[in-house]
Image (tube, helix red, strand yellow):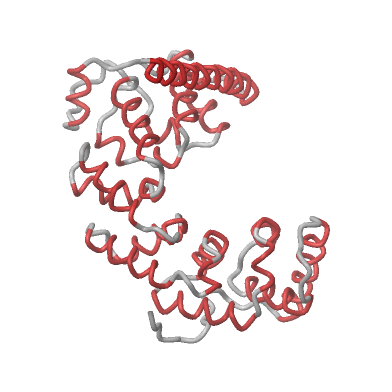
């Protein structure tokens, strides 16, 4: 797709040139210390680093993202400017740029623009507002992979449980829903509904699908063991879903407070315990869930062997 170039605008206040040079030197030294850099042009790399500093990215973020995606430093500065200019023509802002480029190298290769157009058109058909569409893509650049067909499949899977308006909200808050395996998403939905007694309205207020099932189970069960969460009965579930304030027999933490918080905020707010105690419980749960996964795999193999023998 032909994209009109609007120039390489900076959405951050420019740092003094001397400060940029000093920070670029620091970042380059740290990148060299990682021993992950391919053979590359030092001057070009420093220009890329200074370019990213113009967007006010923190030094630690630049070091982390470039050390984990060192191949990006092999693209010429001219390609970086051209690519960023194209992204800005779509409306992407400074904070979106580095996550997009590290999450989808095909943008710098110049092969992802048709995919970007397709994804934005799909999000439009799902009635996601334009600025939210950009945020969805920036938070989940894997949407721009070679095959965009699974996106519609994942969307259809959500419509089996949630309304169109609810799915719109869920996608905006949980962009990974469009690319995660359907089986993983359904396991999370089943756990929320059947083990925690949580329904759509509360689910929509959280970013629960951005977390692993293991994280959800661990937070929930830790809260249960600490006595701050109990499974509501069907009357309480219905009342809460209808936002009735008369049912206060249970005062469970919200789903967002349970899963979207840091370990420190979680244990201090609800459980009056320490992060160290939570870490021990987390390790125990990880081992337990791993054993369950292995047992399930063994069971599947046994079933397969039985079918073949028949």
| Residue 70, image x, y percentages | 69, 62
Tell whether 276 sits left or right of 252: right
95 lies above or below 170: below
Residue farthest along the front direction in this orientation: 310
Q: Is residue 287 left or right of residue 16?
A: left
| Count of number-bearing discs | 0
Q: Nearer the viewer, residue 147 or 152?
A: 147
Describe residue 253's horizontal placement relative to residue 225 as left or right: left
Q: Residue at x 46, y 79 (%)?
A: 86
Quarter of the image for the C terminus: give it. top left
| In the image, residue 180 above or below residue 247 | below
Residue 142 percent location from the top left of the image: 46, 56
Q: Nearer the viewer, residue 126 or 108?
A: 108
Relative side of 15 to 81, left or right: right
Position above or below: 74 against 280: below
Q: Residue at x 44, y 61 (%)?
A: 146
Image location of residue 38, percent across then percent down: 76, 65
- List x then y, in percent, for residue 24: 75, 71
Q: What is the quadrant of residue 160 in the picture?
A: top left
Quadrant housing the N terminus: bottom left
């Amino acid at each position: 797709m032909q994209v009109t170039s609007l120039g390489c605008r900076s959405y951050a206040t420019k740092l003094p040139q001397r400060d940029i040079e000093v920070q670029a030197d620091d970042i380059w030294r740290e990148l060299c210390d990682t021993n992950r850099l391919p053979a590359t042009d030092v001057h070009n790399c420093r220009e890329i680093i200074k370019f990213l500093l113009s967007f006010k990215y923190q030094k630690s973020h630049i070091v982390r993202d470039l050390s984990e995606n060192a191949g990006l430093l092999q693209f010429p500065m001219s390609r970086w400017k051209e690519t960023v200019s194209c992204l800005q023509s779509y409306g992407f802002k400074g904070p979106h740029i580095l996550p997009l480029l590290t999450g989808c190298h095909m943008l710098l290769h110049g092969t992802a623009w048709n995919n970007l157009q397709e994804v934005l058109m799909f999000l439009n058909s799902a009635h996601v507002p334009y600025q939210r569409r950009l945020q969805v893509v920036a938070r989940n650049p894997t949407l721009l992979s070679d095959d965009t067909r699974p996106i519609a499949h994942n969307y259809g899977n959500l419509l089996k449980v949630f309304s169109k308006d609810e799915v719109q909200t869920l996608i905006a808050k949980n962009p990974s829903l469009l690319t995660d395996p359907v089986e993983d998403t359904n396991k999370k939905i089943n756990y929320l509904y059947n083990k925690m007694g949580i329904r759509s309205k509360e689910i929509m207020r959280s970013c629960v699908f951005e977390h692993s099932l293991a994280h959800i189970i661990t937070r929930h069960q830790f809260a249960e063991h600490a006595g701050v969460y109990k499974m509501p009965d069907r009357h309480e579930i219905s009342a809460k879903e209808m936002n009735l304030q008369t049912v206060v027999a249970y005062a469970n933490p919200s789903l967002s407070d349970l899963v979207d918080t840091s370990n420190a905020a979680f244990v201090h707010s609800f459980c009056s315990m320490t992060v160290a105690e939570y870490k021990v419980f987390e390790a125990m749960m990880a081992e337990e869930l791993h054993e369950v996964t292995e047992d399930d795999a063994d069971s599947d193999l046994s079933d397969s062997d039985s079918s073949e023998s028949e």
